[in-house]
Image (cartoon, coloured by chain):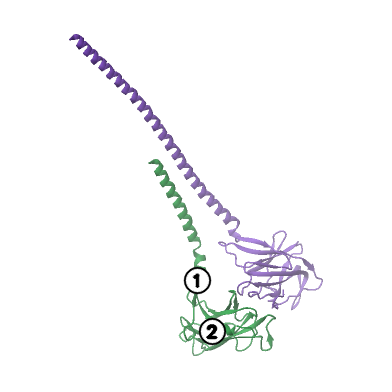
Chain colours: A green, B purple
């Protein structure tokens, strides 16, 4: 009887210790877990049959993607090209001015950011205009273009559009056609 | 009759006596059982004692484990978390070194008392300009901080009041950029090392920093700063 009581007490104490450590670990990692989820890209919104991807009041369609070796006589560094991206954007129901970051993902998981180390030239913008507070005075352009510096020797897979205003962990992923990601 | 009685009595006596002896025998059996029960009882008490001792040892071990875990957490908090829990990775000049998501190549460093920053400015100590290239492994990113550290452990970060050149810049995945970083140090500074900290220190997460001892050449002319530029594929 005493032996059994001793075993039960030991099991209860050990279980309590393990549960306490697990609870402590869960508690202290709460902020990290929430940050990892809400700030990361985990839920991809893909385009519908018409090629439009919709998040809240924003609708984006990729209308063109082609690489060029120079823009306005400014050549890309040796071994690199500029990827020209054309978008059709609709955000008529948006109520706040906002911008979206655009990245291009390759087959090695690398993300190349639009607007970084590219020539300043019309009509290219470093980011997408995704919303407006005044659609009469400052409408969201329906056609927008961007430049992305990409290596020549890589396979480009998709275009990612993301913004802080998107629901947590959500981003838009627009596949790149295989015949349009070839080098110049 | 009497004989028979006597015999009977004797018999009875004998019988009685035997019975008594039997009972005595029973008494001896009782003593045997009594001593056996006593031994069993002592055995049980001994067994219980062993279990009680085991239980006490288990409780003591768990208590010690809890105290040790608390002490370890306290030691980690005091020694690592207060200043960021990081591991120092050693590197050397003129080689590619990967730390976290950054690839770094330190070309060298130069020092002078003067700096060309639109106009020539003179330091009460010395300016140090570090020539380096870096890229990332995953996405566009900027190092959180780059500092110089001397032999005494003193840290020198980016000075304020100078132009935009000489500060950390963003770099892309396998897109190497080369530029220069500006520091200002006291005249009595000894050997210097460059420390690159890729990410914002988070007290709850371990991180790595890169430390590269510098070969610093002395310039008689004012130092100049190079704006970062993307290098051709394969260049450093």
Q: Quadrant of residue B96?
A: bottom right
**CA gap, disc 1 and disc 2:** 22 Å
Task: Please state which of residues B41 and B133 is positioned toward the viewer in this rendering.
Answer: B41
Q: Quadrant of residue B38?
A: top left
Task: Locate residue B148, reporting x and y percent.
Answer: 70, 65
**Of callouts 1 and 2, which one flags the residue occurring earlier in the amino acid sequence?**
1
Q: Chain of mark 1?
A: A
- Specify whether residue A126 is in view: yes
Q: Quadrant of the C terminus of chain A?
A: bottom right
- Name, please, the residue furthest toward the left: B1
Q: A26 left or right of B12?
A: right
Task: Locate residue B185, reporting x and y percent.
Answer: 73, 66
Q: Nearer the viewer, mark 1 or mark 2?
A: 1
Task: Please state which of residues B152 and B207 is positioned toward the viewer in this rendering.
Answer: B207
Residue to which mark 2 is pinned: A129
Q: B32 left or right of B224?
A: left
Q: Quadrant of the N terminus of chain A?
A: top left
Q: B25 left or right of B141?
A: left
Badges 1 and 2, same chain: yes
Task: Please state which of residues B77 and A36 is positioned toward the viewer in this rendering.
Answer: A36
Element marked by disc 2: strand
Q: Are marks 1 and 2 in contact (CB under 8 Å)?
A: no
Residue to which mark 1 is pinned: A38
- Name, please, the residue furthest toward the right: B220
Task: Please state which of residues A135 and A153 is positioned toward the viewer in this rendering.
Answer: A153
Q: Residues within 10 Å of mark 1 (few under 14, many from 20)?
A: some
Q: Is residue A138 above or below residue B108?
A: below
Q: Residue at x 44, y 49 (%)?
A: A13
Q: Is residue A112 above or below residue B68?
A: below
Q: Residues within 10 Å of mark 2 (few under 14, many from 20)?
A: many
Q: Chain of mark 2?
A: A
- Specify whether residue B128 is in view: no
């Amino acid at each position: 009887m005493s032996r059994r009581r001793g075993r039960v007490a030991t099991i209860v104490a050990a279980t309590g210790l393990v549960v306490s450590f697990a609870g402590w670990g869960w508690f202290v990692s709460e902020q990290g877990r929430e940050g990892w989820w809400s700030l990361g890209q985990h839920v991809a919104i893909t385009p519908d049959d018409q090629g439009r991807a919709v998040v809240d009041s924003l609708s984006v369609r990729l209308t063109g993607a082609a690489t060029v070796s120079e823009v306005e006589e400014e050549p890309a560094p040796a071994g690199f090209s500029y990827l020209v991206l054309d978008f059709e954007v609709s955000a008529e129901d948006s109520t706040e001015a906002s911008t979206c970051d655009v990245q291009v993902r390759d087959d090695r998981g690398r993300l190349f950011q639009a607007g970084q180390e590219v020539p300043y030239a019309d009509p290219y913008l470093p980011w997408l205009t995704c919303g407006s507070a005044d659609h009469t005075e400052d409408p969201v352009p329906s056609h927008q273009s961007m430049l992305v510096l990409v290596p020549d020797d890589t396979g480009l897979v998709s275009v990612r559009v993301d913004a802080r205003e998107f629901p947590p962990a959500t981003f838009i992923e627009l596949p790149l056609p295989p015949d349009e990601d070839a080098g110049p | 009759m009497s004989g028979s009685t006597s015999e009977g009595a004797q018999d009875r006596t004998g019988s009685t006596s035997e019975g008594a002896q039997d009972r005595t025998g029973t008494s001896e059996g009782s003593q045997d059982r009594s001593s056996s029960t006593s031994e069993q009882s002592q055995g049980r008490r001994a067994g219980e004692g062993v279990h009680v001792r085991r239980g006490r040892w288990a409780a003591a071990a768990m208590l010690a484990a809890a105290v040790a875990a608390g002490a370890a957490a306290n030691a980690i908090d005091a020694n690592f978390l207060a200043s960021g829990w990081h591991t120092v990775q050693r590197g050397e000049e003129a080689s590619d070194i990967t730390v976290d998501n950054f690839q770094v190549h330190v070309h060298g460093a130069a020092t002078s008392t003067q700096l060309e920053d639109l106009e020539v400015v003179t330091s009460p100590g010395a300016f140090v300009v570090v020539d380096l290239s870096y890229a990332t492994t995953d996405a566009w990113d900027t190092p959180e901080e780059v500092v110089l550290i001397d032999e005494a452990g003193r840290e020198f970060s980016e000075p304020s009041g100078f132009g935009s050149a000489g500060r950390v810049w963003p770099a892309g995945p396998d897109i190497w950029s080369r530029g220069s970083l500006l520091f200002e140090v006291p005249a009595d500074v000894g050997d210097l090392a460059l420390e690159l900290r890729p990410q914002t220190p988070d007290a709850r997460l371990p991180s790595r920093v890169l430390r590269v001892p510098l070969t610093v050449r002395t310039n008689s002319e004012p130092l100049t700063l190079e704006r970062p530029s993307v290098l051709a594929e394969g260049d450093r």
